[in-house]
Amino acid sequence: MKTIDLPLHPGKCPVWLFTRMRKLSREITSIIIDNYGTKELLVRLSDPMFFQALSCTIGFDWHSSGTTTTTCGALKEAITMDLGIAVAGGKGRASRNTLQEIQQKSDILGTSEKKLRKASILTAKVDSSVIQDGYNLYHHSFLFDEKGNWCVIQQGMNPANHYARRYHWFNADRFVANPPNKIAGSKEKETLNLSSNQSENSRKVSLDLVNDNPNHLRKYFGGQTTLLDNHHTLPVRHEIFKSDLSKKDWEVLHNAYELQPKNYEELVCLQGMGKKKLRALGLLAKLIHGTELDWKDPVKYSFAHGGKDGIPYPVDRSTYQNSISFLQDVLAETKSGEKTKALSRLAHLC
């Protein structure tokens, strides 16, 4: 198992460096696409280790501020649709425009908007509410090609310790049941993973509890003390209090009952169905029916030009520009038919 600690630092990327990041990102991604195709680039970006190496290569030290957000920003400007890939979303407010951008850019590329929108919504829902690890998502980048291949790079921050956690996805066909997402970050002690195989029965019972009318659950929110598990310790207390679900929370559950979701995936996607409601349903499923919950953290998981914060050394502008020029020359040679010569030049650098 590979892990990466990602503490957040203050600081901004200088304009002169971001301009070069964009150019170098363009050359690197163009060469990968030219030699291996758009799908291969998406596969690589969905690998936390490749993404970290790319970030370090274009000018970040291993955990400087903006490693995720600025790299994705550079990629969004560098990867234009003439390369066969579209980039949507981003940090904060930009992430809220993801679905609109998917609609616009999928029309241009001629790929299925419905599948891509579903992937964007569900990957964000899973990493923000189904996996409850204490990290609040604030960045969501969605990349896709004309064949419908896609990858997601999103990041959350833990307000308690100011550490970051990055979540990567590629072409998933399942989201709420043991999804193939890759998570890079520091391991947390208190994590509720409602997406694992161990939580399968909890997901089924949670759906049944909602479809059977939430009014039947009110008697369990009387503030009684009930030991939920002899082996796991819940944060701060073991009790379920009436205050755990507000009036608005009950309205959300009643709306869910009216809609009668067919599966847990539909339940998760309902408006207002966030981590608080899903957690309460999971705990009630355990309390009433004894279904297991998974409290294990699912977290899974190079300097070329220096780092923007001067660690391990300041970015050398001349060397950076030489790298851009070199890759531009290699790309020009491959497009002119001299691929063997170009690849030979790259091989001699290794």
Image: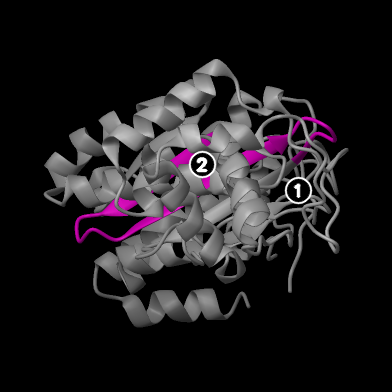
Q: Nearer the viewer, residue 172 or 282?
A: 282
Residue 184: in sight, yes or no? Answer: yes
Q: Amino acid at mark 1?
A: Gly
Q: Residue at x 60, y 59 (%)?
A: 289
**Residue span colored magenta:** 139-163
Q: Residues within 10 Å of mark 1 (few under 14, many from 20)?
A: many
- Quarter of the rendering occupied by the C terminus: bottom right
Residue 306 - label: 1
**In this image, 311 relative to 256: left or right?**
right
Q: Residue at x 65, y 26 (%)?
A: 14
User: Which quadrant holds residue 141?
Assistant: top left
Answer whether labels 2 and 1 touch (C-beta < 8 Å): no
Helix or strand or loop: what does disc 2 sit on? Answer: helix
Q: Amino acid at mark 2?
A: Cys
**In this image, 301 relative to 98: left or right?**
right
Residue annotated with mark 2? 72
